[in-house]
Image (cartoon, grey):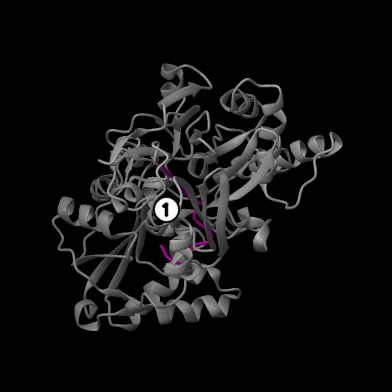
Amino acid sequence: MQNRDWDEECGVFGAINPSGEISDIARTAYYGIFSLQHRGQESAGIAVCQGGTVICHKAPGLVTEVFDDVTLHAMQGYAAIGHVRFPSSDVFGLDSVQPMHIKTKSGFMSIATNGSIMNAPEIREILKKEGAIFQTTADFEVLLAMIAKYRISSQTIEDALLKMMKEIKGAYSIVMMLDDRIIGIRDPLGIRPLVMGENTEGMYFLASETCALDAVGATYVRDILPGEIVSITKSGVYSRYFTDKDTARANGHLCIFEFVYFARPDSIMDGASVYESRYNTGRTLALEAPCDCDLVIAAPDSGVAAAIGFSEESGVPYGSALLKNRYVGRTFIQSTQIQRELSVRLKFSVLKSVVEGKRLLIVDDSIIRGTTTKHTISLLRDAGAKEVHMRVASPPVRFPCFYGVSTSEPNELTASHSSVEDVRLMINADSLSYVSLDGLKKSTKGICTGHCASCFDGEFPAGIPEKHKEMIHRISW
């Protein structure tokens, strides 16, 4: 789905040469965050540790726009962290650009985060009363202030981080850099992903997805467990846990939308292939909601794997009918409905010879508002399609997400107030069906943890912000 009212999550990356050897590590981080660009296009940044000092470069824009060869060459060091960010409705401008670093009595700390701290405003007010001074409105500055506070009374930085984790509520994966280590932190429910890798030269890496490890020539070692703090220093890799390992796995609730849309298809999430999950979902769709049609097509690019799975399970041929202009900006960024509609027509074109006179079935990953789906179906009909049926490789999205995804208001989530038949009429499809939640969950074969599917089922494992509880109650009712 392209005209998405859900902005993607952030992407985080970390690299360290435990030997302390100075190298072109910023360029390595550049490749890492470039491979995570799909997780956010609002801003990019890299911080490098060089002889106990931090060199940081960050700005709004795509990775290729923020960095050039001269900048990267100047950022030599032995450790680095990087970040790409999606647009947020409550933090604007340079305040939102990561990584961020501060100086403390124990040395500097740099941080890059993915997720959301739901009680950050309350913690901010408490820290202000204790004398803390904030320069931004961002959650990650609150985290740095908390860590600095607890570091004073803790023997180790990891002790301070465990104290912080007891105070904060939400979903997050964090990569930190100190003068002698990088640290990866995953929330106790494991809602946000984080993986570790290693290359043949002894360098270690942390990243939101395994595709970033592939980009820098590293081998996947393992996923960071829910509630785990992993520290990588010249002495090796060691971990502390918010709970014990067995409890961490049992309590895992990885965001299922990673498999639906967020993650790159070549990534592995908690032991499950993203591509295979999408393919399996398409096969399940064909069993749960068969369709008498001539051709199965995909909404590029996020519906391709599911469309192939539907085709192979149903025996209906798969074909390419929609072409995507990759030089048109993302349509969800457009500020008005007219602009969004025009962007869809600029972004997609139809192979008329393929669709004319055909009964088509189009597979997409999800429907949020439905405006792009409606206009895509209109394009296919204008090109001569006899029928256009719709199959969706996720259940109806009925609830907003509070765990690090910038989502629509509930009244803009079509399924929160409309029946399947209402949505079908709105998008002008001849038929419409969604995969079941059970079918989607079963598609993530091999996953080591459970799922967070709150956007589908309204069960929020990390809680709901107080100001939104009544809203969620109304939707559930």
Q: Quadrant of residue 269?
A: top left
Main SS class of the magenta portion in the image? loop
Q: Quarter of the image containing the N terminus?
A: bottom left
Q: Is residue 390 magenta?
A: no
Q: Position of residue 296 (x, y in %)?
A: 22, 64
Q: Position of residue 131 (x, y in %)?
A: 84, 37
Q: Is residue 469 visible?
A: no
Q: Nearer the viewer, residue 335 or 9?
A: 9
Magenta part of the protein: which range? 1-16
Residue at image coords 48%, 43%:
456
Image position of 239 with respect to 377: above or below: above
Which residue in the structure is indicated by mark 1?
29
Q: In the picture provided, is 244 more to the left or to the right than 263? A: right
Q: Quadrant of residue 105?
A: top right
Q: Quadrant of residue 303?
A: bottom left
Q: Nearer the viewer, residue 402 or 206?
A: 206
Image position of 360 with respect to 304: above or below: below
User: Which amino acid, mark 1?
Assistant: Ala
Q: Secondary structure at mark 1?
A: helix
Q: Is residue 267 visible?
A: yes
Q: Is residue 10 magenta?
A: yes
Q: Position of residue 295 (x, y in %)?
A: 20, 67
